[in-house]
Image: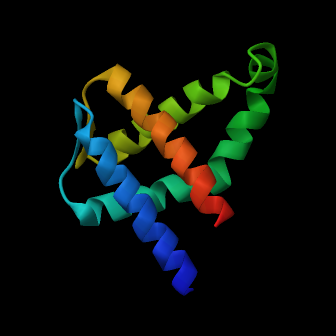
Amino acid sequence: MKKLIIKWLLFALVIMGTCYLPGIRVENFAYAMLIAAALTIVNIFIKPIIKLLAFPINFLTFGLFNLAINFGILYAIAYFIPQYTLSEPLSAFYASIIIAIAYCILRKI
């Protein structure tokens, strides 16, 4: 349980770190924790279904379509949590890459 809370806090810190990119804003750390929880739930339950449906496109693009899936999930989270704003698409794309890498690293810990 302690390990889960530490991962959650580290993931929230990564989300707060992406706020240094232009056009990305989180109101405070509590909302970053909410976003981290929402992203984790989406990555566990919804993302496998999306990846299964997008398998042909993902296969043709050698896995690069996963970046588009991560980008879309990040925009969906920003739509449902108004305290998280993404105003520049390129910064949001970079943030989705950073968050995906951090999620993979934190999942292995």
**Residue at the image position 50 percent from the left and 35 percent from the top:** 97
User: Where 66 sits versus 27, above or below?
Assistant: above
Q: Residue furthest top?
A: 60
Q: Locate residue 5, reporting x and y percent.
A: 48, 78
Q: Locate residue 102, reporting x and y percent.
A: 52, 50
**Residue at the image position 36 percent from the left and 51 percent from the top:** 15
User: Where 12 sits versus 76, above or below?
Assistant: below
Q: Judge from the rendering whether residue 53 lies leftward or rightward of residue 14; answer left or right.
A: right
**Residue at the image position 48 percent from the left and 45 percent from the top:** 99
Number of marks present in the image shown: 0
User: Where 66 sits versus 18, above or below?
Assistant: above
Q: Residue furthest left?
A: 27
Name the colouring of the figure.
rainbow
Q: The C terminus lies in which quarter of the figure?
A: bottom right
Q: Residue furthest bottom?
A: 1
In which quarter of the view is residue 1 placed?
bottom right
Q: Locate residue 84, reporting x and y percent.
A: 27, 45
**Residue at the image position 47 percent from the left and 40 percent from the top:** 98
Q: Judge from the rendering whether residue 20 lies leftward or rightward of residue 97; answer left or right.
A: left
